[in-house]
Amino acid sequence: MTPTPRVKTFRIDGRDVVGREDQTVLEVARENDIRIPTLCHLDGLTDIGACRMCLVEVQGWGRLVPSCVTKPEEGMVVVSQSERLARYRRTILEFLFSERNHVCAVCVSNGHCELQDLAEEVGMTHVRVPYRYPGLAVDASHGRFVADHNRCILCARCVRVCGEVEGAHTWDVSGRGIQSLVITDLAAPWGESDTCTGCGKCVQVCPTGALTEKGHSVAEMSKRRQFLPYLATMREGRR
Amino acid sequence: MKRIVIDPVTRIEGHSKITIHLDETGAVAHAQFHVTQFRGFEKLCEGRPFHEMPSLMARICGICPVSHLVASAKACDELLAVRIPRVAADLRRILNLAQLVQSHALSFFHLSSPDLLLGMDADPAQRNLFGVLQANPQLGRDGIRLRQFGQQVIEWMAGKRIHPAWVVPGGVSHPLEPEVRDRILAAIPEVREIALRTLAWFKPKIEDFRQEIRVFANFPSLFLGLVDRDGRLEHYDGQLRLSDSAGKIVTGALDPARYGDYIGEAVEPWSYLKSAYYKPAGYPAGLYRVGPLARLNLCDGCGTPLADQEWSEFRDLERGAVLSSFHYHYARLVEVLYGIEKIEALLLDPEILDRRVRAVAEPNAAEGIGISEAPRGMLLHHYRIDAQGLITYANLIIATGHNNLAMNRGILQAARHFVTDGALSETALNRVEAVIRAFDPCLSCSTHALGEMRLEIDLLAADGGLLDRVRR
């Protein structure tokens, strides 16, 4: 029998909170209705701390930590909203926008995009760094879906949902740093992938217009993610 | 040889300049209308999924985005190889007419009415919409209201005044709601009254502009535009007709798919705006005009009662086709009236509320061509896609491009008449600009370009030296 996880008492934004030691600071915050912005996190998928939007300050730690992969410790003092964090979050978003070609006005996900929503939430009115305008191809080789790398923020939700939930592991990340790209199989066109089951989970979890269903025009692509917590619960129950 | 430069040309939509060349005797030798922006929409859409094209292309222009939406969506319908629901076509038609009303209102009231009400020689400080509002508050208010009506119809139907995403390949994204129809219908009587009132005000004023009528791009030319199956005025879909200056049909049903056979696009080193010409007549002899004047010249009637009355009166201006481009203003007012009547007629059809407004299909053709009538004239979008549905080629021919040769010839004609003594008087300046204004060019569209909205005129000496330059 697995031992019962121990309970930790700590503070977030001046409030006393209680969490299990196997939870994350982000989970505990959400249980207590404390809003910490996230982008790569999605309930039902393993957290990887990729986007850094959920960075928080922990008193005495000297560095910022991503709350999605930080476990609670007894007596820790967490600050999730501060001027410094707001500045960092806005800067992270500006980097994301400048890195590829996020043109909301002509995007199929306009109005249904987590990146766009967050930019509004943190008050990002403009981008202070030069845009890179990379010339990235659109992969429309799949019969039903389109992968537009111009709109990808490398959150790797597609990689995780494909590997962890669908079990196909069609998606992965190639390259390093700014050269990174999500790929299907060994960088084969998506339509030629041997492993893709065509389930479309990657499309539904993608926070932006990078992975979309074909046939949608501008602002028409909204994602349906309700299935994910159910699937995750079902699978946990079966184990 | 001397040179006069007018830079920028004012009260138009886009940035341009005019150069007037003088010969040794100081007389006007030739004139050029330069469009100085470059945007490259045809190139930057390459590699994009074709479903994005209507909204992507609509971004060419903030004044007539609906025209681009419509022409682009029609090209995409061809890529899908579907026949879209009739109601979807009618809804697009209403949206297109709403834009016609607002764009014509902008051109007539906001940009040109200062010249028409206050006179071509009025104080430049007064020659604007505020001057109009002071001198004739009713006229100014009418213009603003009319434009608002067009914009509101677009907003109510499509969700947004500028760049709505409602028009999609295969139809429109959602059907018309009864309360929107009722709201539009409720506004019709007021705006119809405005259109009639403005026509009644303008028609007697025409006499005051005899001189301008005579030299504002007044010459025989061909006219190109859409008509419906019965030969009546049409802006959304129909047959492409070419008529001549006698008012006779040269060819009744040009096939849009073969536009390359009869429309050529010439490039001149002094402008980013291409010059479209009728190929069988050659370049530059194949000059033709498009837009309100052309449409009223080549159709056999409007098909709505009030506009038909105004149309026959308009056509009585001259025997054969109405040739002076000054009458673009008049034609615009007739079309506004038609647009309002037609919107009402389409909305009174109970089927307009039908819920089936979109045909869904995968791409079934590799090439699609869509044409429609933008406020300024015939607009053509031509796309090719690869096996994945990504754009490999796009070509746009824009109304202002069709009119380019006519505008150039028009400013030469006006400059010859008004530019005297090798200098550009205020009188001459405003009249040369007003020729361009009569065409209501949209330069951001025509070059698919990005830039400031300005116009300049250069007056050049025989040796090419700059004699006079006016910038605004």
Image (tube, coloured by chain):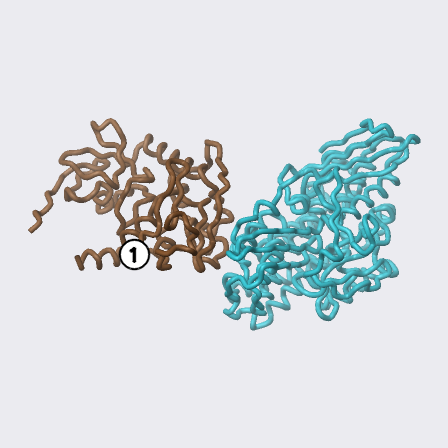
Chain colours: A brown, B cyan
- Identified by mark 1, the residue type is Glu
Q: Position of residue B18 (x, y in %)?
A: 77, 37
Label 1: few (<14), some (14–19) or many (≥20) C-alpha neighbours in 10 Å: some
Of residues B351 and B446, the one drawn nearer to the viewer in this rendering: B446
Q: Secondary structure at mark 1?
A: helix
Q: Position of residue A196 (x, y in %)?
A: 36, 56
Q: Is residue B268 left or right of residue B65?
A: right
Quadrant (top left/top right/bottom left/bottom right) for the C terminus of chain B: top right
Which residue occupies 64% across, 68% down? B345
Q: Is residue B8 left or right of residue B243?
A: left
Of residues A181 and B74, the one drawn nearer to the viewer in this rendering: A181
Q: Position of residue A226 (x, y in %)?
A: 31, 57
Relative to residue B144, is residue B464 depicted above or below?
Answer: above
Residue for badge 1: A166
Which residue occupies 77% across, 51% down? B277
* Chain to which the residue tagged by mark 1 belongs: A
Quadrant (top left/top right/bottom left/bottom right) for the N terminus of chain B: top right
User: Which residue reaches farthest right?
Assistant: B25
Of residues A65 and B456, the one drawn nearer to the viewer in this rendering: A65
Q: Position of residue B7 (x, y in %)?
A: 73, 34
